[in-house]
Amino acid sequence: MADDTAVDTAEDAREEEHKVVPPWDEVAAALVAAFDGAIFHDSHGQPVVYVPREHWAAAALHLRDVERFTTCLDICAVDHLTDADRITVDGVTPERFEIVANFLSHPRNRRIRLIAQVPATDTTIAAVTPIYPGVNLAERETFDLYGITFDGHPDLTRILMPDDWEGHPLRKDDAPARVPVTFKGDPGPR
Amino acid sequence: MADEIETIDVDEELPPPSDGEVDDEVDDGLVDAGDFDAYREDTAEYDRLAAQTDEGAQLLTQHSEIVVTGGPWPELEGESQTMIINMGPQHPSTHGVLRIMMELDGETVVRAKPVIGYLHTGMEKTAEQLTYVQGGTNVTRMDYASPIANEIVFAMAVERLLDVEVPERAQWMRMLLAELSRMASHLLFQATNGMDLGAVSMMLFGWREREETLRVLEKITGLRMNHNFVRPGGLAADLPDGWEDACLDLCDIVERGIGEYDELLTANPIWLERMVGVGVITTEEALALGASGPILRSTGFAWDLRKTQPYLAYDQVDFDVIYTENGDCFDRYRIRLHEIAESMKIVRQCVERMPSGDYRVQDKKVTPPPRARIDESMEALIHHFKLFTEGFRVPAGETYVAVESPRGEIGCYLVSDGTGKPARMHIRGPSFYNLQSMQPMIKDRMVADGVAIVSSVDPIMGEVDR
Amino acid sequence: MGLEAVPYNFLTARLEDVVRWARRNSVMPATFGLACCAIEMMATGAAHYDLARFGMETFRASPRQADLMIVAGRVSQKMAPVLRQVYDQMVEPKWVISMGVCASSGGMFNNYAIVQGVDQIVPVDVYVPGCPPGPETLLHGILTLHQQIKTGDLLKRREASPSGGAGLEIDQRDGTPVDLPTVSARA
């Protein structure tokens, strides 16, 4: 299991304080073994692997070629700027943005989720589109709404907002989620 | 003519442009019509071609009108005379506001690029402002042809984060509503697909049965569309009296209806001509592009989440997964037609075997108390107040739940931050990914096939653009 | 329109009634279904709630041939210029029904992405509330429009109309303001 590999005294001490969850999912275990810094997390019974940003494309490639995950279902981003509370996973430094990818293996009938932390100062990550062509539009949408740049994407342009829109609306500090409701007969906005 | 022209050394400058005349005798290094025997009057080839006309010997003129003097001439790419046309966003093929830019070579589509965003509603941003009970109103308007599927996936995601177990009656009721919604959506497909391909009366036939389905949905949920009936923890209300007869009568009506569509269309030569072999997609392409639902099942791959990863009570009812081999538009039409029949099977089993019990989880922190209790108990009043003003709080966490909507796998990725409103709610809309599968389908087909292909992909722009 | 030069008298009143009768009994809607309301609009045109009894079942795809634009659904920022373009391409007389709360006021989506009421872009004659409005509600809206056509003037201008419209001033393409004739509203 992953916590048996590469354990030194510093990690031993940390382990006693916080319990590191061993991956009960073989695919997660393989990912944790293959990529340095990948951490497994059990999210309400679903396997999640927190992958460091630099290994993002390699992890997707591993899932496709080795683990037979036929489809990347979805790529989306989460903005944690105004979170009141956030789940903490040991070994993962939380950043403002997270990129989340859900995968499905049809032959093995299993799912897995990969999450990468993306700092607000450097909103770039590798594109998964060259590996799974199905997330082409999803990565464009994430770029459009969050401003995350996907390196290696063939056509990273705005998709949902008009081409001349400025800003990235789904960021917590960008577009308003509630605009003042105007009542036509009323001189001032409500 | 040969007598008057003096020979020119090719290394010298070319003579100044004459008034359009080309000298065949001069080798000026440029290819022109004079190089071909067919255009030289004194050659055998010219005579042969001239003899083929029945108006006597005629002067065969050059094809090209470009003056081959002066220069340098840009390379003329004669092949790529493609034209880019725009289909939508306002067009009569009633699939909402989808815009497709097609590059045409004559009538053949070389490339088609869907441009979306004309219905972008910012629903994911609005979801961050609504409580979890209100979230259903938002989510239900994404795939507005089968709203129950959206509501179910959102409610299931919230329940997973809350770690609550929905009672059995609620599971069966949700399943019943999901199948009724699936029937309504596939009937809408039959109607719009027929109309797009020219069978305009299908619009009226499909809507006739769909009205009956919506009548039953209105009886149960109170609304014809966008019901907001499936809430986290269960449903908004219990089944009304007389629902069994209503459902069974509906099944009889719809069964007659789909028999009519089958008779009208399935063996119809025009229908077959327009649909068979059109828009073929292979399993590898479909899986690579993330397509799911009838598109994937039409390629020969029988993947249905209701069977492979059962949720609600689908593992306790008996139904078949419809799949075909060819991957063309006709197959998708047939799959959706037969899925209506399978949904009716499930509805009939729900009517027979609906368990009794609670229609929502009896957890005071999640479910509002019955209205009568509010007059009796202070605690009930406080709970009611807090639940309807603030909403219940969901502990911090994230989850992804997927169900089988009529269009494929619809998923909800929900991140909560401990407050009464989600931190992030993202819906993985099947049509968003299914639209990508339109591109391999439409390649090297004609424009008219494009309409059939978009119709068979059955996109609902509400969940594409969100 | 040539009739504005004709002086108003007893004979032209009969003619106006005939013209108004013809106009309200042959309204042709333009296909402008955007979202969920489009499904209910199609249901209104279907056999159960029949629009054909008003002569309105032919939804014209080309705006040149349509005189009623039923804006059915939420109008996003990207769609707004398209909406205005289609409205401009329609030939007078033209009417707009704003179907559903999203088209009337932005509905439940008061965020960055949705135009808060389509009357910010085009002048609206009838607002039909509902989310989505059932076919009966839409039919009531259509009948209200028919009533307006019946009682309004031949050269109905929205600002002077009894419903008030949106008070929208629409300039010509070259920027000159529209010179509206004074119309007397009769009972």
Image (cartoon, rainbow, N blue to C red):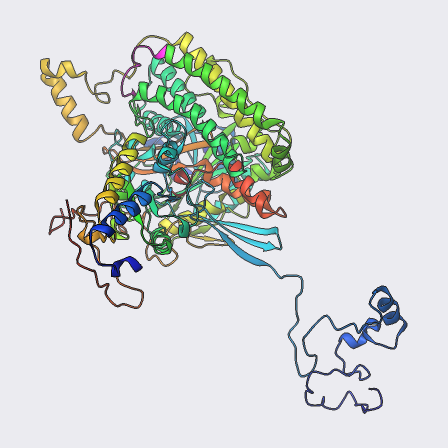
Q: Quadrant of residue B42?
A: bottom right
Confirm whether residue C125 shows in the render.
yes
Front residue (pair B387, B109): B109
Residue A4 appears anywhere in the view: no
Q: Is residue B178 above or below residue B123?
A: above
Marks counted in the figure total: 0
Answer whether residue B239 is magenta in the image.
Answer: yes
Extent of the magenta region: B234-244
- In the rendered image, residue B182, in percent from the top left (x then y), is placed at 44, 25
Q: Nearer the viewer, residue B326 or B26?
A: B26
Quarter the C terminus of chain B occupies: top left
- Residue nearer the viewer, C151 or B423: C151
Q: Position of residue B453 (x, y in %)?
A: 55, 40
Query: Residue visible at 25% across and 54% down?
Result: C155
Identify whether B106 is placed above or below B73: above
Q: Given the current orientation, which residue lies at the most extreme front position? A: C11
In the image, taking residue B80 as reference, residue A178 lies left or right, namely: left
Please say whether residue B382 is one of the residues in the magenta stretch: no
Q: Position of residue B348 (x, y in %)?
A: 45, 12
Residue B358, picture quadrant: top left
- In the picture provided, is B292 more to the left or to the right than C14? right
Horizontal side of B45 relative to B18 (left or right) equals right
The residue under the point 31% across, 50% down is C94
